[in-house]
Amino acid sequence: MRELTPGQLADLLDLAGELKARRQAGYSDLPLKGKVLGMIFEKNSTRTRVSFETGMLQLGGSAIFLSGQDTQLGRGEPISDTAQVLSEYVDGLMIRTHEHKRAQALAENASVPVINGLTDLEHPCQALADLLTIKEIKGELNGLKLAYIGDGNNVAHSLLIAGALAGMQVSCAVPPGYEPNKEVVEAARKIAQGTGAQVDILNDPLEAAKNADVIYCDVWTSMGQELENEKRLKDFAAYQVNEKLAAYAKQDYLFMHCLPAHRGEEVTASIIDSEHSVVIKQAGNRLHAQKALLVDLMATAR
């Protein structure tokens, strides 16, 4: 997210909205006709794979799924070699992996655009879809308050940067010891100085939720953290998004979750299945936000 300026973020969201509206009106836009996206998955996914693959097809291109076990990466080939070789075949790459440095290494060695589909540091495509969803419903982003409740993880990191770029107030409430990456927080606050945004890192979830336009949470135990599950269930017990917490938000608040969700843990069924919940629309907007990103990066490449 830090590679975008506030203007570039706004342009991407406008393009996503335009592509979505044209698709719903029955138009077929094919700016990526003949283009191929290589999708490297070292971490399982439902939404990321289907939305990117569908997006490429709708834009006139195609996508190739590459799991770690299907490529020489699974046998120890350096990612630098893989990046250079795949650049000879495809027009863009998307990687969903664990360590952020692997995505960086892919980008540094590829001669085609590289998209971060998720790393342990950030989930920027999710944040694009999140802001698109909020903008569609609320009509604007600037000045809105987003309360993120839970783990200071990759989703939180991208929301902090994206919210700062959009001029929002992002209040992130986390248990002690689970704070977001300090460098990311500093970067978000630096951006906020130029956009009028506000970035708060708190330990009190009720304070974060106070007067919030949006309440957002993620699972307490992410993929790869299963051995920490019992400890995390205890540490996050006071951070559940429930009726008590939601009562502190504005009456017309939106509830958001990047999914998959664990009802009864990070959020109660009464919240995620309520009229305030926009989680399905949010998931659907992954397709449209990513289509805008694909067009922006690949339409004129090569």
Image (cartoon, rainbow, N blue to C red):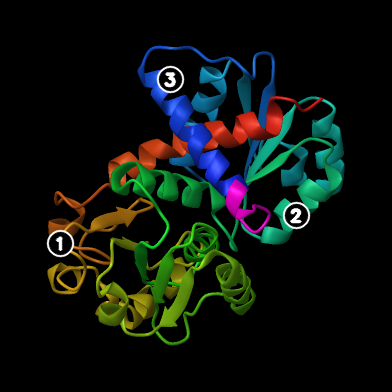
Circle 1 is placed at which residue position? 251
Residue 266 drawn above or below residue 298: below
Amino acid type of the residue tagged 2 in the rendering: Gln
Residue at 51% over, 19% down: 58
Residue 6 location, x and y as percent?
Answer: 59, 54
Residue under the image location 28 percent in, 67 percent down: 212
Q: On the picture, is 285 further left or further right than 41?
A: left
Residue named by callout 2:
104
Separation (CA) of disc 2 from disc 3: 34 Å
State which region is magenta: 1-7
Q: Dot 3: what SS?
A: helix
Residue 250: image location, x then y, percent: 20, 65
> Can residue 228 be seen from the camera position used here?
yes
**Nearer the observer, 171 or 36:** 171
Residue linked to disc 3: 22
Report x, y in % for residue 252: 18, 57
Q: Does 252 appear above or below 59?
A: below
Chief secondary structure of the magenta span?
Answer: loop
Q: Are marks 2 and 1 in contact (CB under 8 Å)?
A: no
Residue nearest the viewer, comparing 1 with 268: 1
